[in-house]
Image (cartoon, rainbow, N blue to C red):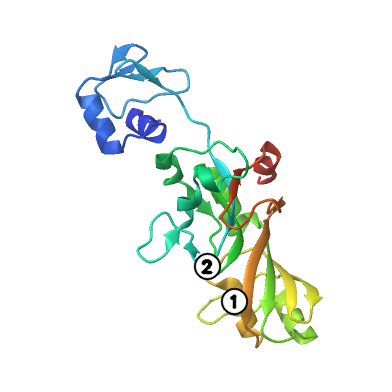
Amino acid sequence: MRLDKFIANNSSYSRTEVKRLIKNKTVCVDKKITTDAGFTVTSQNTIRIDGEIIEAIKPLYIMLNKPTGYVCANKDNIHSPVVDLITEQHALQSDQTPPKYRAQSLQIAGRLDVDTTGLVLLTDNGDWNHRVTSPKKACFKRYRVNLEKPLDDTAIKLLCEGVMLHGEKAATLPATVELISNTEVLLSIQEGRFHQVKRMFVKVGNCVVKLHREAIGTIELDTNLKPGQWRHLTNEEIEAIN
């Protein structure tokens, strides 16, 4: 990895600040001053800035119970972004809160609409995020859906087989539908198209009035998490996404 990228990824310094530090000869690799921002470093190297060691930070993996009114983004001009909830006061029990600069850089693995609630996963591990979100990985997401009208057998059959959404070139992949009541279902899908769940039900002549995500793959939303609360994923949960 490039020296400047390593420092920026593992500290609060921006890439511009890192380049300035390197240029000013304050950065050492294995006790030798380095002025090459593109110098390749590995886990075997020791990097210091003004004598302080910069250690590789372990990736963050966070589960959040998203409330309504928050947008799945790092910044937004209208709604509050979900990363604003990754603070000490919103942590479940005594979970260690990451510093603000790390929380602001988290990637959202599986976005939800502003009015949709439930499980959101956040990480700064790009490969892990890709395994969650890539359609090729077929990672199912389960939603609890409350509907405006009763859902009949014909609509269920269409949803399970796949429907052609407006403006799309291919039908949705087969879904699974579990009927809780005539107006409440558990829907599992393996894609993440724009407003997909809502559009699927519009296609079969219905309307979503409430949408809540309960699971991503085998990771279930912790029932101890109140809306707006978060916690770190367990090792078992992290490894379940493969």
Q: Amino acid at mark 1?
A: Lys
Q: Quadrant of the N terminus?
A: top left
Q: Residue at x 47, y 62 (%)?
A: 71
Q: Closest to the observer: 131 or 222?
A: 222
Q: Closest to the observer: 87 or 111?
A: 87
Residue 201, placed above or below residue 11 = below
- Answer with the quarter of the image where residue 93 lies: top right
Element type where label 2 sits in the image: loop
**Which mark identifies residue 198?**
1
Residue 121, placed above or below residue 157 = above
Work out how far the residue at label 1 is from the one at label 2, CA to CA, in angstroms.
10 Å
- Answer with the quarter of the image where residue 61 lies: top right
Q: Is residue 50 visible?
A: yes
- Mark 2 neighbour class, 10 Å CA radius: few under 14, some 14 to 19, many 20 or more: some
Residue 2 spot, x, y in % from top left = 36, 30
Q: Which residue is mark 2?
A: 113
Left or right position of 10 against 66: left
